[in-house]
Amino acid sequence: DIVMTQSPLSLPVTPGEPASISCRSNQSLLHSNGFNYLDWYLQKPGQSPQLLIYVGSSRASGVPDRFSGSGSGTDFTLQISRVEAEDVGIYYCMQPLQIPYTFGQGTKLEIK
Amino acid sequence: QVELQESGPGLVRPSETLSLTCTVSSGSISSSTHYWAWIRQSPGKGLEWIGNIYYIGTTYYTPSLKSRVTISVDTSKNQFSLKLSSVTAADTAIYYCARRRAIYGCIDVWGKGTTVAVSS
């Protein structure tokens, strides 16, 4: 199985400040089509996860442009340029490249 | 906007079979561009992929659960289902149904989730 490792696991952030979450895989997530198969999801309190970023850097429909994804191969980053109160929740990375598809442990973002 | 709704018992006895159904609304399950998936979330194991199905019945299961899992589709009812046999307390979780894009593989629609407890 591909193991996904996120850091940090807890991320206190002041509103208006930037935030960054790392996700590393133990195998390359580069598909033969040239895309990196790495997604980012946000699970807000009491809700199901929602898609933020797919194939490493493409924002899903309706996702604010303060969210951006980068990286390739085995190292990926989710960045929030200016954190807002509504961004609190748990962020997960996921690889849909190889069965079984696997998730990171989650990073809990909280407002200071 | 496609919506997904899980339904089924909230309590299952150990060694019995967990059965859940996901109803797809505002869209067709017979989409050539999507798969239909089951994912679960428990405090101990986080988010865990169970498997998915294409509308023609092609299935993919996570190997660790493959011997106990069956996912099926009913296009006439716009539904797909999960059966997990021989359940134990370790199968207690929130179960989500979801839609996965065939291209790129991301999960673009999630159901609200249903909690299933395994207990006698």
Image (spheres, coloured by chain):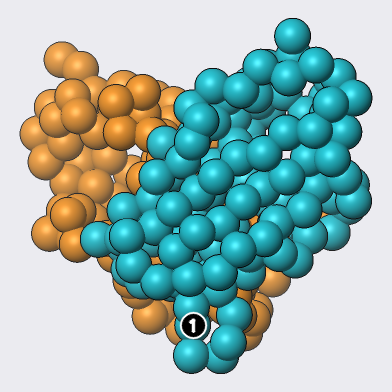
Chain colours: A cyan, B orange
Is A76 left, or right, of A4 in this rendering?
Answer: right
Q: Which residue is mark 1?
A: A31
Q: Nearer the viewer, residue A5 or B21?
A: A5
Position in image of residue A43 (x %, y %): 63, 33
Position in image of residue A90 (x %, y %): 59, 29
State the residue at coordinates (87%, 33%).
A82
State the residue at coordinates (40%, 71%).
A28
Residue lying furthest top = A112
Judging from the image, mark 1 belongs to the subunit labelled A
Residue B29 position (above or below residue A112)? below
Mark 1 residue element? loop
Residue A84 position (above or below residue B95)? above
Is B39 left, or right, of A69 in this rendering?
Answer: left
Identify the amino acid type marked 1.
His
Q: Residues within 10 Å of mark 1 (few under 14, many from 20)?
A: some
Q: Nearer the viewer, residue B105 or B75?
A: B105
Dividing the picture into quadrants, the one containing residue A53 is bottom right
State the residue at coordinates (80%, 33%).
A18
